[in-house]
Amino acid sequence: MLRLINGYRVRGHQNANLDPLKLRPQPAVPDLDPAFLQLDRLDPATHFNTGSLAAPDRMPLKQIIELVRRVYCGTIGAEYMHITNTHEKRWIQERIEGRPRIEGASVDEKRWLLTLLTAAEGIEKHLHSRYVGQKRFSLEGGESLIPLLDELIQHAGRNGVEETVIGMAHRGRINVLTNILGKPPQEIFDEFEGRIERDPARYVGDVKYHQGFSTDIDTPGGIVHIALGFNPSHLEIINPVIEGSVRARQQRRGDRKGEQVLPVQIHGDSAFAGQGVVMETLNLSQTRGFSTGGTVHIIINNQIGFTTSNPLDTRSTLYCTDVAKMVQAPIFHVNGDDPEAVLFVTRLALDFRFRFNKDVLIDMVCYRRLGHNEADEPAVTQPEMYKKIRRHPTVREIYTQQLIADSIISPSQAQAMVENYRKSLEQGRVVSRPVICAVKNRFAVDWRHFHSVAWTCPATTSLPTEQFKSLAQRLLELPSGFELHPRVEKIWRERQRMANGDQLIDWGFGETLAYASLLTEGCPVRLSGQDAGRGTFFHRHAVIHNQVDGTPHIPLQHLADDQANFLVIDSLLSEEAVLGYEYGYATAEPNALTLWEAQFGDFANGAQVVIDQFISSGGEKWGLLCGLVMLLPHGYEGQGAEHSSARLERYLQLCANANMQVCVPTTPAQIFHMLRHQILRPFRHPLIVMTPKSLLRHRLATSPIQAFTEDGFLNVIGEIDAIDPESVKRIVLCAGKLYYELLETRRSRGITDTAIIRIEQLYPFPSDDFAQAIAPYRNAEELIWCQEEPLNQGAWNQIKHRFAEQVAAGLRLWFVGRPRTAAPAVGYRPVHVQQQQTLIDEALTGRINPEMNPMVNQL
């Protein structure tokens, strides 16, 4: 008998009544058959010990079988036996096995359920008839999502939640906006009719089913702020963005356990099983730097992905939710045609999250009444499925008949609900629960002073000398008895000489001093990435380890008693989810410096969707500001195609209307001022930084203390050697570490007719600073852009038009770099060395390769 009980706990969900359409026969599960355990030979009245079953200690065989079937094979299928924590499993068992003895929904709850189902169905019918053929990605077939979300918000508020952040794709989004968040129907109608309020010169806008929204809703526990994140069409990519936004809000509140801010993710079944970012985001959930105290995941499981519905094609697992077992999240499957079961599961899932601070899944099995969009014809590829759907009543029709049969409402009352909702829509009134207006939240962020700020907005980034030196000394203080690794100890000795002014400051110390200065000025800093603590190239050492016992020490957390928070995170091996997370964090927290560092810049394209759909374009599409900094190690040093290029050209191609900045700093002072500049001025747009590798320890890539205490960030750095401007015939322009190779070669050869100018900010292009830098060279005849990257890559094709004015004035413009290639770099070091020397020679001597410059001077 105990084996039978356990069999239902482990596999009962496989025989649960989950599919409203009953598309496929249920599998035979021997573990659920009493005959398999030879229990059919016994008298049904025989009493058995029930073990840990939430029931009397002894019960008749027949009643035990009835109980476990009712619990595990009804319209709820619970998957939780994969969890290894016994306490969590026992908690779930007590809640679901005790359910048959708990009263169901009250009469008032049932009437409210029908009201919500009426609204969910009503908005879809109204839009279908009013805007024929227009895409809205209907919720029809999954209308129980609306009472689910309503109960989730109310129950969360009852349990002390003050903010809920929701991520979801397009399916049902307009329904949720209207019936849950209280977006006025007239605004929805205006979007269908193409009326816009925002200036199209500043915002390109987005389709109506990608729009975000925020509101405040009253609950039994107080007002809950609800934010629905803006979403692109790229499925599931919103997941890490929402998690990052939640973490920022929790950080601001000091909400360490996630008791006040709740993340909610709404997924599609095919996307949840198919998109890798789902696994990556789940993998963040229990890590120190990314945990948000547990996320409630809701699957709108309409059993189809566009035109693909056969599980043999959509996944390699039994359920679409199986990936969540990797984090031992409980999974509650529920029949979407049983709204009362949906409510029970919603409360159960939330209670589990509040109790154990872990992710939990609600798999609401339903169907898609229409096609992928309203212009689609689904029966072309799913004829049998859609025959069943056309005959199948809506969930509201099913539940209405149930309440009429139970004498809870009359047919006329049910019809009155429909008419009242339709009138509310036509009048453009808010149709959801009471939405609270003009709520003052002390944790809210005022973004107004960040809007309409030009990138040229000034900020003082230098520090007084004594303050700078004091910070440098504090960074070097160690706990008593702390034993450094010999290699780190050598770096500490060098930094001590730098702090004393006896040695020029290198890159690692200059960057660390930027963070230290901001922290002591009250600005939090969050830095994440693979190996971010030490630094991929052994240069940062933001975290050091006692060689005696392995204890970590983070000097940037011990600068002053009243300093801001510093968090450095060695992230999991993910680009897409981690970068998406940091973007979400930065969009929710403008008053912190948020940085993501790629291990090598080459690997950032693992997060290309985040870069394309959010970082570069989120401002123009949705009006979202974001001050995220991306640190991308870049430079050609003979390490092959995968460790040379951060794909600078791709970022420049994405630039328009000052949407972000792209910089290539070449000195420690420059990185110091650039990072401070990013947060001290009220300009919140992404900053893309091509950071160095070999320069981290280059003897020339150093800065004196005066460069930190007297100067600021320089968009363009002019000639530094004492060259007579009148004798200059050639001006070489470059960016990044190539500058030092050009400089050393010029010095070694005694060349005096060539000036070298560094462009430190490539976008927005600093035209005035550039013109000022080349102005002294009145006798120059050639302007050469020199880059390490091939002709079809790097900055050239995105900035050459910036030099048109100089070409018009009579200067000949030339390109020097590697020839066109599909790969960024060669894989053979001798070839790399030869290519590098060739382009340096060509730039300094003016021996131009005509094949790479056929029409360049026709700009």
Image: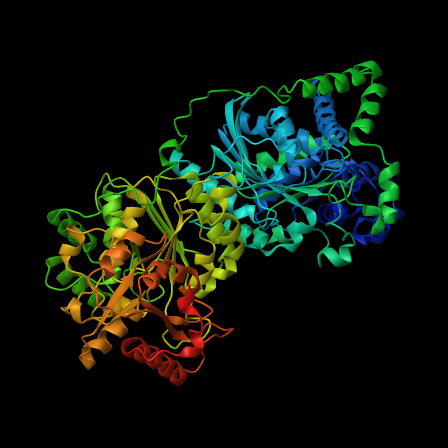
Q: Name the outermost residue toward the bottom.
A: 830
Residue at image point 17% right, 79% down: 750
Observer-nearest residue: 650 or 467?
A: 650
**How many numbered marks appear?**
0
The correct choice, above or below, for 564 with respect to 805 in the image is above
Q: How is the image coloured?
A: rainbow
Q: Position of residue 57 (x, y in %)?
A: 71, 36
Q: In the rendered view, does 725 fall on the left or right side of 159?
A: left
The correct choice, above or below, for 114 with respect to 365 in the image is above
The correct choice, above or below, for 279 with respect to 460 in the image is below
Q: Position of residue 665 (x, y in %)?
A: 29, 59
Observer-nearest residue: 645 or 526?
A: 645
Quarter-wise, where is residue 664 in the image?
A: bottom left
Residue at image point 84% right, 38% down: 62
Q: In the rendered view, does 225 fall on the left or right side of 412?
A: left
Observer-nearest residue: 714 or 69?
A: 714
Observer-nearest residue: 308 or 745?
A: 745
Q: Could you tell me if residue 725 is visible in this image? A: yes
Q: Position of residue 471 (x, y in %)?
A: 18, 50
Q: Could you tell me if residue 600 is visible in this image? A: no
Residue at image point 66% right, 48% down: 81
Q: Position of residue 516 (x, y in %)?
A: 24, 49
For the C terminus, the quadrant is bottom left
Residue at image point 47% right, 37% down: 258
